Amino acid sequence: MCKQKISGIIEKYRGKPGAVIHALTEIQHANHWLPRAVMQEVADALGVPFSQVMQIASFYKTFSLTPKGRHEVHVCTGMTCHLRGGARLMEKVAEITGLTPGETDTDAKFSLEAGSCLGSCSIGPELIVDGKHYGRMTPERAADVLKQYE
Amino acid sequence: MPRLQTSAELEALRAKILAGRDPARPSIAVCGGAACDGLDSAAVAAALAAEIKNQGAGAKIDFRVTGCHGFCNKGPNVLVGPDDVCYFEVKPEDASEVITSALKGEVVDRLVYRDPASGEKAVHMSEVPFYKHQMRILTGDIPRIDPTRITDYIAIGGYSALAKALSQMSSDQVLQEVKKANLRGRGGGGFPAGLKWETTKNAPEKTKYVIVNGHEGESAAFMDRAMLTGNPHRVLEGLIIGGYAIGAQQGYIYTRHDSPSMAKHITAALEQARELGLLGKNILGSGFDFDVELHFDVGIFVSGESSALMRSIEGNPPEPRPKYIRTSVSGIWDKPSNLNNVETWANVPEIINRGADWYTSIGSEKSKGTKLVSLSGHVVNSGVVEVPMGTPLRTIVFDIGGGVPEGKAPKAIHFGGAMGGSIPIDLIDAPLDFDGMAKLGAPIGAGGLLLMNEDTDMVEIARYLLDFLVKESCGKCVPCREGMYQMLKILTNIIEGKGRKFDLERLADLTEVTSLGSLCALGKTSSDPLKSMLRYFKSEFEERIAAGSQTT
């Protein structure tokens, strides 16, 4: 199913060399990472060199060149969250998941990321799992939140 | 909806929409802004909608989910019309009581604002201290419209400025009005928007572009997102007017990829504007053709820098260019490109509608109009604030923000995120003003105001900000890539008790070289926070270095 979805995205941008970022973003959102073969397909379909696709994919932080876990865990490291104890929250989440930011566990359950400011500063520090925001998060409550995810 | 051919048809549509609406009818507006969403306002909205259905009151009450109301930390926010009763921290369980009271014109007493100190109640928006001291010209409409319905925007007078510009003004007159209003860019520099427009307008190329910078990468800044998500049409209207004044055929909105509701609202706004003929060929019969494309940043701070942003729109990696090539003359695909930030564009319809004289009557001597501020940090009331330029910081921090929580004393005010600066609390009577704040060493930047309490470790904050920028540097130029890294190393050493004599001199040297030698604003201003902290909080650095050398 995912393969079909990826092909659909690539078809949409066929012959449009200016749309590399658009295509990669949509694939990243659908598939959570960019396999090399898919990047080659993007290069061929859009008519750009593979090196250009690779340059963009490796430059922007949103793109992942390695597989991601089923759940993407972000701890906001923006300024307000930092002032309000974001670093302690990150330590705790790292301890619970056994990951440092940027890593994925061997069961491909969680990927941990240090997210930049997402603009919900008024309710920081924030823990975000698969796009769901958990505001006013404390290190103590983090385990309960993460337990809900299989 | 049929395509509008003339300004008169737009007015007729507006009259028709208004004829179908009763301003005295009760209404419920649930905030769906970033913070309220994080507090699960979606569940509250669902409960309220279900309750309206239950009570069979669909015809008696208007219901909408809106953008950010402003008072974020008291969310989920619900505003009940017609007389703007504010409910805070509303839960799904409150739905039946809220609807029943709204229908009867009563107030649910336990959900209204109470002053944390005196216990005094404030029922209506105009009485709540957080809103009372504001002037909400740009944001005031957000609770009144469903951002996904263009009819709501038209009902509150939307696109009348565009109609006026196209039917009654020449492109030069529009430009002159914006110049006369002395609208200054809200993205950070405060450069006069009119002059920038003029440069692009006068550039020899025929193909020209106008761009909304909605990247908002500045940490602790969230007002542009609130504006663009809550009222995308206002920004779009400003952009179309700018396109007309400048002679551009194509506009771009560049924004974050990580706010799904923002992308959805902008996409809907563009589609609906196109359907009504407010975008496309021959807009309102004026002969002016203009369309807009939406582009996304994909997660790197430097792509908010204007030349980098333009590379990104072209589909290339966002590496900045030296500043001597001005993007106003040679931007996207080397064509003249005028870029302004979200808030700047949002000001344009108001200037055209009410005139430059009205606009210049608001604000300080050199900074006109209002300014959006994201108020957060160690502050009781946090959220999106709009005040006239020149408002003393004290009003923002105390009257609106309610001061520091937990009885602590304030220590510093930080403006402008990772490239801004911190000033000590003694300077709290300084007015919010581009030039004044820049002189103090805390330029407004985009407008993220962070209050810090007495426990804040300034050395650690300086290190934290540099750590962020080191990771965000694109690495193209040496002074930025290496200079910041060395500053970070010294600061880390100081914090770890390994500070050395002359560290501060070395830091001063590095800040100077990095500011002078970097290609773009990221490197040039990377050391601004550090400079401001060395200016006002030097003793903290000296103490840390001295304490470190004793233990080793």
Image (spheres, coloured by chain):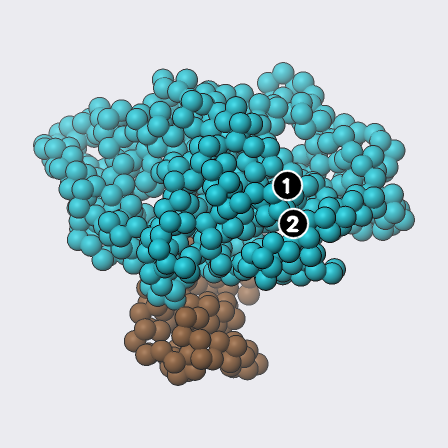
- Chain letter of the residue beneath label 2 in the structure image: B
Q: Which chain is cyan?
A: B
**SS of the residue at dot 2?**
loop
- Chain letter of the residue beneath label 1 in the structure image: B
Q: For the point 41% across and 59% down, which residue is it?
A: B206
Q: Nearer the viewer, residue B100 or B540?
A: B100
Q: Nearer the viewer, residue B225 or A121?
A: B225
Whether B138 is drawn above or below B288: the answer is above
Label pair 1/2, CB-CB below 8 angstroms: yes
Q: Could you tell me which quadrant the N terminus of chain B lies in?
A: bottom right
**SS of the residue at dot 1?**
helix
Residue bearing the label numbered 2: B147
Residue B552 appears left or right of B472:
left
Residue bearing the label numbered 1: B142
Q: Nearer the viewer, residue B392 or B503?
A: B392
Label 2 Cα neighbours within 10 Å, binned few <14 / some 14-19 / many ≥20? many
Q: Which chain is brown?
A: A
Residue A142 is at least partly visible in this image:
no
Residue A31 is at least partly visible in this image:
yes
Type of the residue with mark 2: Pro
Type of the residue with mark 1: Ile
Distance of label 1 from label 2 (alpha carbons): 8 Å
Residue B381 is situated, as x and y percent measured from the top left of the image, at 55, 30
Considering every residue shown, the one lying at the far right of the view is B56
